[in-house]
Amino acid sequence: MKYWHIFWAFFIPSILGYGGGPSSIPLVEHEVVTRYGWLTTSEFSEVLALGNALPGPISTKMAGYIGYMQGGILGSIVALFATIAPSLILMIALLGLLMKHKESPKVKKMTYLVRPTIAVLLGVLTFDFLLKSEEGVGWIQTIVIAILSYLMLERWKFHPVYVISGALVYGAIFIR
């Protein structure tokens, strides 16, 4: 029964928390603190602070930690599954629907029209990264890193892992 409670404590906020982890945090707090009493409010705020300090999605980190506290490794697995299950189910259903109608002219036109939108969104994201980089390290280093990264990826066909690792090493040594 404990694992069933762990599942529902994270499944319900994942369904109702439209907008990702930050929007589901109050719902998780209600389940974990008020409904099941697994944590106090201050303990929950510590778990939230710890989750925010680590990289990755906040809701899965909190689910894994709280699930482990309540049910060990199996509790952690149940909580993580409950957190990702709604998105997984919806994604599989929508993908199945899309694959069923992939030859439809409307679906082809929709996917054709979505591509430029994605390209613009990625372009805006890249521009924002460039501006943030310029604020942090200046234009010269930003331009040098951008040009070297472009050459390594497009001209010399380096794997992205090597380019990212090289940028991390460069930043650790030369940027303070």
Image: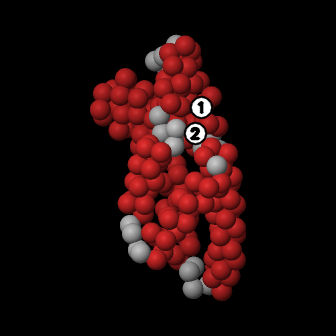
Residue 19, percent from left and from top: 65, 45
Could you classify mark 2 by the number of other residues whose Cα lies within 10 Å: few (under 14), some (14-19), or many (20 or more)?
A: some
Q: Point out the image quarter for the N terminus.
A: top left
Q: Residue sitting at 65 percent across and 80 percent down?
A: 112
Q: Residue sitting at 50 percent across and 65 percent down?
A: 148
Residue 117, percent from left and from top: 70, 69
The quadrant in which residue 69 appears is: top left
**Farthest residue in the left direction?**
73
Spatial distance from mark 1 to mark 2, Cα to Cα? 6 Å
Q: Residue sitting at 53 percent across and 25 percent down?
A: 49
Q: Which mark is residue 1?
A: none
The residue lying toward the viewer, choosing from 139 and 150, is 139
- Disc 2 on helix, strand or loop? helix
Label 1 sits on what residue type? Answer: Ile
The residue lying toward the viewer, choosing from 176 and 61, is 176
Q: Residue sitting at 41 percent across and 75 percent down?
A: 156
Q: Which mark is residue 21?
A: 2
- Marks 1 and 2 in Cβ contact (< 8 Å): yes
Q: Which mark is residue 25?
A: 1
**Residue 82 seen in the current view:** no
**Residue 52 seen in the current view:** yes
Q: Is residue 6 left or right of residue 35?
A: left
The quadrant in which residue 6 appears is: top left
Label 2 sits on what residue type? Answer: Gly
Residue 8, percent from left and from top: 48, 34
- Disc 1 on helix, strand or loop? helix
How many marks on residues?
2
The quadrant in which residue 17 appears is: top right
Could you classify mark 1 by the number of other residues whose Cα lies within 10 Å: few (under 14), some (14-19), or many (20 or more)?
A: some
Q: How is the image coloured?
A: secondary structure
